[in-house]
């Protein structure tokens, strides 16, 4: 019997992969050896986890550019939709946009207040969250995304802060990959770990990164 969870959810439901992704979001261009030293996991285990994250479009690899002799190292970075992207990440984003456009064409009543790039950003964000095991409810007027009850609150309660940082990083990466005015502000504070509301905002046209 299968769990019904999407593949992307299973890729980050394992805490070791969450830890590796958090390390790569915080400190880009790390080698397998760096990740082994940071996690204490066996090198083969780290390689398997990193490969799973690459396959899901969360991590990208590059060959080190060396100016001296020696074998170049393979460096790994978290996909952020800006400086670092991947073919799989771009494919997932474009597929989400296409599905959103098709849905609004077939069912015009599903169209919200947002249009253009903002709507495409939401298309990709909602699908990314669904793949992450969440059941997002979007308020386009308040620019919030309700994720309560949190799909990970009980299974990974001991690692909540790190897990939330990883998911916020994934959300920001998705919005940047699409391109548009929406960006993630962060989570609204709550004393209940099961509650999760993500606040978005429209970036001002004259804002530069």
Image: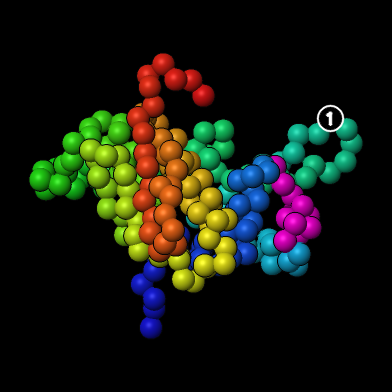
Magenta stretch: includes residue 30: yes
Front residue (pair 184, 7): 184
Would you say 171 lies left or right of 68 here? left
Question: Which residue is located at x 44 percent, y 58 percent?
Answer: 191
Q: Is residue 203 above or below residue 31?
A: above
Element class at badge 1:
loop
What is the x, y in percent for residue 93?
39, 44
Question: Which residue is located at x 40 percent, y 31 percent?
Answer: 179
Would you say 73 lies left or right of 181 here? right
In the picture of the structure, the residue carrying the numbered disc 1 is 67
Quarter of image, res 201? top left
Quarter of image, res 90? top left
Residue situated furthest front in the rendering: 191
Count of numbered circles on the image = 1
**Mark 1 burial class by Cα count in 10 Å: few <14, some 14-19, many 20+:** few
Secondary structure mostly taken by the magenta-highlighted segment of the chain: helix
What is the x, y in percent for residue 183?
41, 35
Magenta stretch: includes residue 15: no
What is the x, y in percent for residue 58?
53, 50
Q: Is residue 122 visible?
A: yes
Would you say 155 lies left or right of 194 here? right
Question: Which residue is located at x 64 percent, y 56 percent?
Answer: 20
Would you say 111 lies left or right of 132 here? left
Q: Is residue 55 visible?
A: no
What is the x, y in percent for residue 86?
52, 43
Question: Which residue is located at x 37 percent, y 42 percent?
Answer: 199
Front residue (pair 3, 99): 3
In this picture, which residue range is highlighted in magenta?
29-39
């Amino acid at each position: 019997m299968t769990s019904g969870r999407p593949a992307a959810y299973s890729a980050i439901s394992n805490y070791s992969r969450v830890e590796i992704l958090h390390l790569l979001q915080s400190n880009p261009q790390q080698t397998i050896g760096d990740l082994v030293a940071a996690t204490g996991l066996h090198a083969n285990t780290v390689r398997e986890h990193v490969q799973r994250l690459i396959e899901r479009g969360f991590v990208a690899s590059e060959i080190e550019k060396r100016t001296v002799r020696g074998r170049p190292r393979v460096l790994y970075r978290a996909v952020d939709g800006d400086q670092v992207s991947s073919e799989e990440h771009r494919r997932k984003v474009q597929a989400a946009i296409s599905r959103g456009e098709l849905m609004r064409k077939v069912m015009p009543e599903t169209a919200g207040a947002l249009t253009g790039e903002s709507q495409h950003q939401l298309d990709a964000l909602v699908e990314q969250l669904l793949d992450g095991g969440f059941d997002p409810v979007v308020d386009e007027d308040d620019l919030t995304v309700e994720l309560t009850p949190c799909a990970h609150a009980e299974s990974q309660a001991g690692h909540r802060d790190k897990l939330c940082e990883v998911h916020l990083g994934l959300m920001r990466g998705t919005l940047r990959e699409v391109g548009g005015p929406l960006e993630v502000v962060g989570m609204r504070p709550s004393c209940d770990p099961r509650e999760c509301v993500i606040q978005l905002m429209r970036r001002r046209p004259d804002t530069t990164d």
